Image: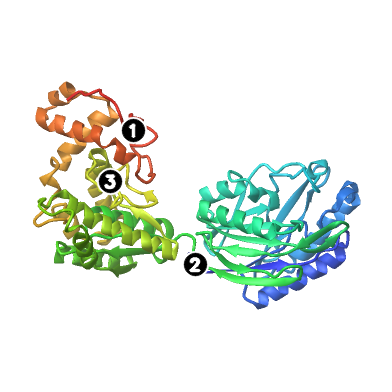
Amino acid sequence: MEKLRVSLAQINPTVGDLAGNTKKIIEYIQKAWKQGADIVAFPEMAVTGYPPEDLLLKPGFIMDNLEALRVIQKETSGLTAVVGFVDGEKEIYNAAAILHDGALSAVYRKMYLPNYSVFDEERYFKKGKEPLIVTLKGIDIGISICEDIWYPEGPVMIEAMAGAEVIININASPFYYKKWKVREEMVSSRAADNSAAIAYINAVGGQDELVFDGHSMVFDNQGRIIARGISFEEALITVDISEGSGVSIALSGGVDSALVAAIAVDAIGKENVTTAFLPSYYTSRESREDAERVARNLGIKLLTIHIQETFESYLNDLKEVFSGVNPDTTEENLQARTRGNIIMALSNKFGWLVLTTGNKSEMSVGYATLYGDMAGGFAVIKDVPKTMVYELCRYINSIKGREIIPETVLTKAPTAELKPNQTDQDTLPPYDVLDSILKGYIEENKGIEELVSLGFQVETVRKVIRMVDSSEYKRRQAAPGIKITPRALGKDWRMPITNRYEIY
């Protein structure tokens, strides 16, 4: 994600002092502009002060508040401001105005109205009906107001699922003893749960019996606090948010990871994609060269982290336990799981979402390592058969007008490179045969006799079906992915893990 500079104007609005509040808001807009802010956010109902109570029943008060907002918007040249105000006329809303470069570009209306304790917002306001995402510098920003953020399935989640990388939540949240701690824990959870940075701005000051303590804060998309405002004092908190949409991919030099990397670059930009080449003793020079060529063609960062020493330390730790037992797929899977540990460590440290690279053919028959190459947060090509993977790669090259995915990647025999001279076809039928059988069995519910009648060997069909049925426990633990075929492995495929029905 490109760097976004956010300023939080932790101010003390006075209820009913529309002129004074307007003047103060403009002053802080100018301060934020001098600090190079891209966007500055003000507290809930900053124009009117909070809570204005029955002043909201006066039509003149509402109209004056709207006029004050028009004065403020003229002062937003060169940046964006999120300003709390009262929207509407006959029916009114607790709202946030998005003011950009001297104009009112959008309005968000609060969706959850508190009506308990000291709050009685349902007495005055109508509920908003739609979340709001605005785009600034190519970054999607979700807008919400106070109570909205307290609901796990509320606007914050909806906006994050729709692509918001940053959430701005404006507040007039009254103080009580240690409430700051409750707020921090909640906002941290929302950020981590939704993989979105959250900028939380709160008012300071007092109104009748209420005190507002400020304590504004910014969390990154892992739920870690990166800025915190002081309590009970006006302040301008300015912070750069640079994490949010980054992804990481284990780039093996094979066709699947090359395709996932190309899709990621198209989707979120090359600056947000980091790949890792994780060679072991069995990794070929050709795979290294192909991984480097893919990264170079896409213009993405490639980290090289050798796993052999770590892998050997695992073998040494297991030496006594494994004594007298011949090496088998256990050692092969251990290499994949070493890679899984490393790619997930990168995710934890830098906040990158790991994209897994398994395709539908592999996931169908369980040709993947649980907690190894299956480790990650999103499976881009989970529903893409292997034969279609090749088609998509050639399509990408054709529409780009140049070689994005090298021909060497497209023509070499697919291999996991977990032992000498290994290829996928040591374990699986040729992919054109496998994909045809899988399409018949998974998408068309064909049985053995119907598949054999299409020309496939009976033993091959039985082997494939047996692999599909016995791999259900793996698929239940796989990352979610995009459905593109008539029957995807996931929501479309609900086979019980434990059952006695066999057709082979």
Label 1: element kind:
loop
Which residue is drawn at the image coordinates 76% and 58% (left, top)?
175
Q: CA distance from mark 1 to mark 3?
A: 14 Å
Label 1: few (<14), some (14–19) or many (≥20) C-alpha neighbours in 10 Å: some
Earlier along the polypeptide chain: callout 3 or callout 2? 2
**Is label 3 or label 2 in front?**
3
Instruction: Pick the quarter of the image with the C terminus.
Output: top left
- Residue 79 in view in this figure: yes
Label 3: element kind:
loop
Which residue position is annotated with label 2?
2
Earlier along the polypeptide chain: callout 1 or callout 3? 3
Q: CA distance from mark 2 to mark 1?
A: 37 Å
- Residue 48 in view in this figure: no
- Of 305 and 74, the residue lying toward us: 305
At label 1, the amino acid type is: Arg
At label 3, the amino acid type is: Asn
On the rendered structure, is 340 left or right of 503? right
Which residue position is annotated with label 3?
359
434 above or below 313?
above
Across and down, in percent, residue 392 comes to 28, 49
Q: Report which quarter residue 258 is drawn in.
A: bottom left
Q: Are marks 3 and 2 in contact (CB under 8 Å)?
A: no
Q: CA distance from mark 3 to mark 2?
A: 30 Å
Q: Are marks 2 and 1 in contact (CB under 8 Å)?
A: no
Q: Report which quarter residue 387 is drawn in.
A: top left
Give the color scheme: rainbow, by chain, secondary structure or one colour. rainbow
Which residue position is annotated with label 1?
487
Across and down, in percent, residue 417 comes to 16, 56
